[in-house]
Image (cartoon, grey):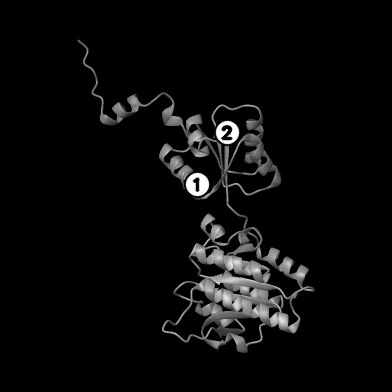
C-alpha cells in the first residue's frame, strides 16, 4: 500500500482556500489590503463615468481599484490611468462592494485627496491679481498639528480676505476632513499651499515684497506695530510656538499681551486676533476694502 506524504499546516491552509483567492490582488494580499483600508480618510469616487471624468480633468487620484475581468469603458479607464502612471489595484467584486459601501461602483473605484493643495506660486499669482484692491495677506503655519486649529484658521482667513495659507509637507497638519469640517466651509475658498521648506518659502515671500511677522512671545505688542502693506504672518504650532529659524528670518516679532494666569493662547485664537488687527489697520489706512 502506497504511503501518503505528510501535509504540513501551511499546505492544509492553502488547500482550504477558495479557488483563485490567493491571487485576489496583484500585490501580496496582506499588503494590498492594508493599502485599501488606508483609504478610510480619503474621498471615494465610484462608477465609470465619474472616474473617467476625473481622469480627463486632471484631478489628483491616489489609486484606482478595478474589478477583475471588466471590459468596455473600464478598459479605457485602465488605459488612461496607465498613461498617467497611476497606481492600479485589481480586486474581486466583493471587495469593491465593501469599499463602495453599497454604492453602484460598476467595477471602478478611485481614491482621491479630499482637497487640492496648491503651490506657493499660485498664492503669489493671486496676491498679484488683488494688489490693486487690497494688500495681500498670506499665513504660514509653522509646526501646527491640530486639524481643528487649521480649520479655524482657514475660517478666519476667509473672513478677513487672506490670500492663502502655507503649510510644510512634513511634520505638519494636513487638510483633512476634520480640518475642513472645522473650517465651516472656508476650506472650499482659502487656498492651502504645501511646501517642502517653510523657511525657504518665507524667503521667497520677502523677495516678492512681503513684510514678515511672527506671532510669538517676547515680541512687540501687536497693536503698536504697523501691519499694513503686503504681509506674511507666521503662526507657531501648539506648545512649541514659532521655530527659532523662522523667528530669525521674520522682519519683526509681535505678541498678544496676556493679563491673566495663563501665558499663551490657542494657535487659532491667536491667529484670529492678529489677522483681525491687520484687517483693522488696513481699513483705517485705506489699504483694504471697506
Q: Is residue 59 above or below residue 77?
A: below
Q: In the picture provided, is 56 more to the left or to the right than 33?
A: right
Q: How many marks?
A: 2
Q: Residue at x 66, y 41 (%)?
A: 83
Category of crowding for the residue at label 1, using alpha-carbon neighbours closer than 10 angstroms: few (below 14), some (14–19), many (at least 20)? some
Q: Quadrant of residue 4?
A: top left
Q: Quadrant of residue 104?
A: top right
Residue placed under numbered mark 2 in the picture: 104
Q: Measuring from the top left, give residue 151's x and y in whole percent.
A: 55, 63
Query: How much space separates mark 2 and mark 1, taking CA atoms?
Result: 18 Å
Check the picture and name the quadrant holding the C terminus: bottom right
Q: Measuring from the top left, give residue 111's x and y in whole percent.
A: 56, 45
Category of crowding for the residue at label 2, using alpha-carbon neighbours closer than 10 angstroms: few (below 14), some (14–19), many (at least 20)? some
Can you tell which mark lies on residue 128?
Answer: none
N-terminal of the pair, mark 2 or mark 1, is 1
Residue placed under numbered mark 1 in the picture: 39
Q: Measuring from the top left, give residue 57's x and y in whole percent.
A: 70, 46
Q: Is residue 166 visible?
A: no
Mark 2 residue element: loop
Mark 1 residue element: helix
Q: Quadrant of residue 161?
A: bottom right
212 or 229, which is in the foreground? 229
Amino acid at each position: 500500500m502506497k504511503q501518503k506524504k505528510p501535509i504540513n499546516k501551511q499546505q492544509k491552509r492553502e488547500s482550504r482556500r477558495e479557488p483563485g483567492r490567493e491571487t485576489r490582488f496583484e500585490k501580496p494580499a496582506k499588503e494590498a489590503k492594508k493599502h485599501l483600508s488606508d483609504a478610510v480618510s480619503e474621498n471615494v469616487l465610484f462608477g465609470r463615468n465619474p472616474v473617467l471624468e476625473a481622469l480627463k480633468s486632471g484631478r489628483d487620484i491616489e489609486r484606482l481599484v478595478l474589478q477583475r475581468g471588466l471590459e468596455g469603458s473600464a478598459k479605457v479607464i485602465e488605459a488612461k490611468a496607465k498613461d498617467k502612471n497611476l497606481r492600479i489595484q485589481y480586486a474581486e467584486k466583493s471587495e469593491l462592494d465593501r469599499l463602495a459601501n453599497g454604492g453602484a461602483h460598476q467595477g471602478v473605484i478611485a481614491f482621491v485627496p479630499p482637497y487640492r493643495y496648491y503651490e506657493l506660486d499660485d498664492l503669489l499669482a493671486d496676491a498679484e491679481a488683488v494688489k490693486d484692491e487690497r494688500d495681500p495677506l498670506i499665513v504660514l503655519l509653522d509646526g501646527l498639528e491640530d486639524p481643528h486649529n487649521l480649520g479655524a484658521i482657514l475660517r478666519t482667513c476667509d473672513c478677513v480676505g487672506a490670500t492663502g495659507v502655507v503649510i510644510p509637507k512634513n511634520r505638519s497638519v494636513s487638510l483633512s476632513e476634520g480640518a475642513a469640517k472645522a473650517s465651516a466651509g472656508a476650506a472650499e475658498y482659502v487656498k492651502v499651499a504645501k511646501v517642502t521648506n517653510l523657511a525657504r518659502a518665507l524667503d521667497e515671500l520677502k523677495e516678492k515684497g512681503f513684510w514678515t511677522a511672527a506671532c510669538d512671545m517676547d515680541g512687540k505688542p501687536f497693536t503698536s506695530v504697523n501691519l499694513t502693506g503686503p504681509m506674511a504672518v507666521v503662526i507657531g504650532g501648539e506648545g512649541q510656538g514659532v521655530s527659532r529659524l523662522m523667528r530669525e528670518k521674520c522682519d519683526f516679532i509681535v505678541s498678544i499681551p496676556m493679563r491673566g494666569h495663563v501665558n499663551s493662547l490657542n494657535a487659532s485664537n491667536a491667529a484670529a486676533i492678529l489677522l483681525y488687527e491687520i484687517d483693522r489697520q488696513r481699513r483705517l489706512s485705506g489699504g483694504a476694502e471697506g
